[in-house]
Image (cartoon, rainbow, N blue to C red):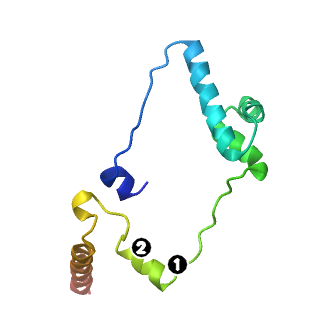
Amino acid sequence: MDNRSTGFDSECDLSFRLESAANRAAAQGLRVRLVAHWLGWSPALLDEAVARTGRLGSAIDTLRGDARLQPIEPRPLGLIASFIAAFHIGDPVGPADSFRLGLRCRRFATEAAAAGSRELDAV
């Protein structure tokens, strides 16, 4: 999760109350079909792994070697990437913050200066 998806862009989240066994089975079938599609597996293969492990996450972990999507290992950040991460460029807190990099930089500088003075007071 990042600021952009929780406070800037609009998203649509749905929840359902599945009271019958038939409805729960239909929702689980849809979930398996969607996950299997994005991982490049047959729904039957993933469904069998879910039945064997009892959980979708565990099933994915057991089958991951054959997946299209693979975990991305983090790499050390370079100078520019560190700057982008430090000032949250591209990760606005809300619409008012979206194109105000200068204000965001000043806010972070003020916060950094305040944190530095607190450290000096502690010495």
Q: Quadrant of residue 106?
A: bottom left
Q: Quadrant of residue 14?
A: top left
Residue under circle 1? 77
Q: Which mark is residue 85?
A: 2
Residue 12 in picture, x, y percent from top left: 39, 39
* Mark 1 Cα shell of 10 Å, populated few (<14), some (14-19), many (≥20): few
Q: Quadrant of residue 43?
A: top right
- Residue in view at x 26 percent, y 83 percent: 116
The local secondary structure at tag 2 comes to helix
What amino acid is labelled 2 in the image?
Ala
- Residue in view at x 72 percent, y 31 percent: 47
Q: Which mark is residue 14?
A: none
Lateral position of residue 23 relative to residue 1, left or right? right
- Residue in view at x 38 percent, y 75 percent: 86
* Mark 2 Cα shell of 10 Å, populated few (<14), some (14-19), many (≥20): few
Residue 48 in picture, x, y percent from top left: 77, 31
The local secondary structure at tag 1 comes to loop
What amino acid is labelled 1 in the image?
Leu
Residue 71 in picture, x, y percent from top left: 65, 58
- Mark 1–mark 2 Cα distance, whole angstroms, equals 9 Å
